[in-house]
Image (cartoon, rainbow, N blue to C red):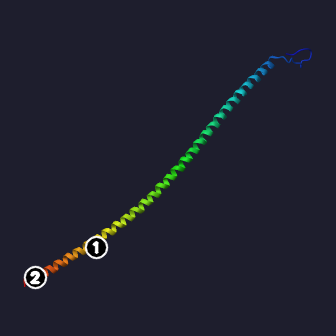
Amino acid sequence: MVQGIDSLEVNSDTHFDDCTSSSIDHDSRDAHALNEKLSKFCENLLSTYKLLKSKSFELKEENKNLFSKLNMILQERVEISNERDSLKTQLDLVLNKNKIGFSSRSQRINNLRIITDSVFSFSAF
């Protein structure tokens, strides 16, 4: 509102000043509310980070245990394979020995038959 003779003089208690003051209070409350939301978001983010970090540590420990078990199983597999190979070799040796022994027995039996046949044929004369 203009007062007095000077047209540039303005009254400081205008409606505009009241709106601006009200607007600043409202903006201040909005900023405070946003700050609260941001603070809660950061707290939730931090707690989620801590939870994930803990879970990550647990998973690393579990992986370490699983790799240890896997190494043990692989070592047992190698030992079992070596034992199987050893048993196979022993079996082959026994089978070959029996084959040779059987062959020798067969030869002895054949030799006895030849001798027996010779004796019987000699006695027939």
The label shown at residue 1 is none
The label shown at residue 100 is 1
**Quarter-of-image position of residue 107:** bottom left
The label shown at residue 121 is 2
**Left or right of 56, for residue 113:** left
**Left or right of 47, for residue 21:** right
- Quarter of the C terminus within the rendering: bottom left
Can you say whether 102 is above or below 42 in the image?
below
What's the residue type where badge 2 is placed? Ser
Q: Residue at x 71, y 30 (%)?
A: 35
Q: Residue at x 65, y 33 (%)?
A: 41
Can you say whether 90 is above or below 27 in the image?
below
Q: Residues within 10 Å of mark 1 (few under 14, many from 20)?
A: few
What's the residue type where badge 1 is placed? Ile
Q: Position of residue 77 (x, y in %)?
A: 44, 58
- Quarter of the N terminus within the rendering: top right
**Left or right of 86, for residue 53:** right
Q: Residue furthest top?
A: 4
Can you say whether 2 is above or below 59 in the image?
above
Q: Residue at x 25, y 73 (%)?
A: 103
**Quarter-of-image position of residue 6:** top right
Q: Which of 60/118 is in front?
A: 118
